[in-house]
Image (tube, helix red, strand yellow):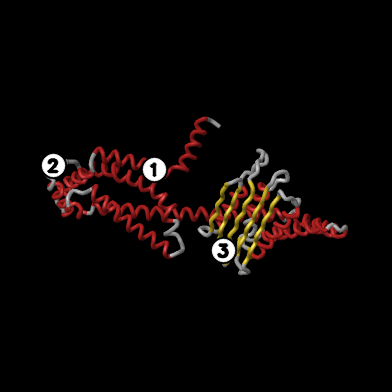
């Protein structure tokens, strides 16, 4: 790749990641330099002076009286020049600063309050907006204060009103854009799942019937452990074939599948004191919908990276579903791995993606490493 193209690509990646910080800092530095070079009071007074030359108005009279009360001369600038100066030294950098900070206002505050389904969260947003307006009003009154007359002219109220209005419009526009992007991702994930299900229909039925034949053969040859393993595997494959085509399934079927999978894992591993497997699956019997095969990658990872034949190891799986709330916890030993044995993290990344699309704001997934133990904790409000 040519050098200019590499530089452009790296800059674009950097810009996409840090543009709110860059835009906000640019506006802040620009506004600070402009305010240091010419105080805002002088600009507003000059604007009032230029307007008074065209004819006095109550607004300009208020400004002039406030300025003259301090006994200072009024700068003489033309209206056209002063308007452009105000635009490029005050309003443009101010809008850049608001755009940069408004990005974080949306992601860390508005999404959790204004766009939350609960009424209390929406009230928190508007209460915080009103409180911020008063704080901004007090600050603007101090910065733009000339006299009580100029305060009544409305400068101190215009700045916080502009700020709150700009942030509100920015959050609405950003939320519409984010929702459209999430809808596109969900539609893409649905198409990929449908394609994968269609592709999976080519060979697995043959394998499923072959497993049934092997199960009958193991039974005829009096191999109970092999027969039980093949029965568990056949049940798992049947569930995967049927449920992979659905967007939702009943939690009872998912729990039966997980229990079969855990039993199969126990059967395939040798019974040794150095291998400790603990499972706790509890369901209160109340029906609830769930995305099929959602937890399986987490359980697979626990056995894949937490079990070793040569070293002491353990896997602990807990799954509780109570009153429509699913709580999942997996713990496995952290074992030394070669570069070829290390995982890519795709399984966990796919789970995060499916959770974000299927249960926005209804789930919490955390991972942690401590004391040679890797822990995954997931909580989902299914209904």
Image quadrant in which the N terminus is located: top right
Image quadrant in which the C terminus is located: bottom right
Q: Residue at x 72, y 50 (%)?
A: 273
| Number of the front mark, 1 or 3 | 3
Q: Secondary structure at mark 1?
A: helix
Residue 350: x and y, percent?
60, 51
Query: Which of the marked residues, 2 or 1, is nearer the chain's N terminus?
Result: 1
Q: In this image, 48 relative to 373: left or right?
A: left
Q: Residue at x 35, y 52 (%)?
A: 166
Does any portion of residue 367 appear in the rendered image? yes
Image mark for residue 120: none
When the figure is inspected, residue 153 is found, relative to residue 90, above or below; the finding is: below
- Front-lying residue, 138 or 200: 138
What residue would you read off at disc 1?
A: 23
Please identify the residue farthest to the bottom as the structure is shown.
Answer: 286
Please identify the residue farthest to the top as the structure is shown.
Answer: 3
Residue 39: x and y, percent?
23, 42
- Front-lying residue, 15 or 293: 293
Q: In this image, 19 relative to 242: left or right?
A: left
Quarter of the figure with residue 318: bottom right
Residue 83: x and y, percent?
25, 44
Dot 3: within a 10 Å radius of its alpha carbon, few (fewer than 14), some, or many (20 or more) residues? some
What residue would you read off at disc 2?
A: 73
CB contact under 8 Å: marks 2 and 1: no
Q: Residue at x 47, y 39 (%)?
A: 14
Residue 159: x and y, percent?
28, 51
Q: Residue at x 55, y 62 (%)?
A: 381
What residue would you read off at disc 3?
A: 325
């Amino acid at each position: 790749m040519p050098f200019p193209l590499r530089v452009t690509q790296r800059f674009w990646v950097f810009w996409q990641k840090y543009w709110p910080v860059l835009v906000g800092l640019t506006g802040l530095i620009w506004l600070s330099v402009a305010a240091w070079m010419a105080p805002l009071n002088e600009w507003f007074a000059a604007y009032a002076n230029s307007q008074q030359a065209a004819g006095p108005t109550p607004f300009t009279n208020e400004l002039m009286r406030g300025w003259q009360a301090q006994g200072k001369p009024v700068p003489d600038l033309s209206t056209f020049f002063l308007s452009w100066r105000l635009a490029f030294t005050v309003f443009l950098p101010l809008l850049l600063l608001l755009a940069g900070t408004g990005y974080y206002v949306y992601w860390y505050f508005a999404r959790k309050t204004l766009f939350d389904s609960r009424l209390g969260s929406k009230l928190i947003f508007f209460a915080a907006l009103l409180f911020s307006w008063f704080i901004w009003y007090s600050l603007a009154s101090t910065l733009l204060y000339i006299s009580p007359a100029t305060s009544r002219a409305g400068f101190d109220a215009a700045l916080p009103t502009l700020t709150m209005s700009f942030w509100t419009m920015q959050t609405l526009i950003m939320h519409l854009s984010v929702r459209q992007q999430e809808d596109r991702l969900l539609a893409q994930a649905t198409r990929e799942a449908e394609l994968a299900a269609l592709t999976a229909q080519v060979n697995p039925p043959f394998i499923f019937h072959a497993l049934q034949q092997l199960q009958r053969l193991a039974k005829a040859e009096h191999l109970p452990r092999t027969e039980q393993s093949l029965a568990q595997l056949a049940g798992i494959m049947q569930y995967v074939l049927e449920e992979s085509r659905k967007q939702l399934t009943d939690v009872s079927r998912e729990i039966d599948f997980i229990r079969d999978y855990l039993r199969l894992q126990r059967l395939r591993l040798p019974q040794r004191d150095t291998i400790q497997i603990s499972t706790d699956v509890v369901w209160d019997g109340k029906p609830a919908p769930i995305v099929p095969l959602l937890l399986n990658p987490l359980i697979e990872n626990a056995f894949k990276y937490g079990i070793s034949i040569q070293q002491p190891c353990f896997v602990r799986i807990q799954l509780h579903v109570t009153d429509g709330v699913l709580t999942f916890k997996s713990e496995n030993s952290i074992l030394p791995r070669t570069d070829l044995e290390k995982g890519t993290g795709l399984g966990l990344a796919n789970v995060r993606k499916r959770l974000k699309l299927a249960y926005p704001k209804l789930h919490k997934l955390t991972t942690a490493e401590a004391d040679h133990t890797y822990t995954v904790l997931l909580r989902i409000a299914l209904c």
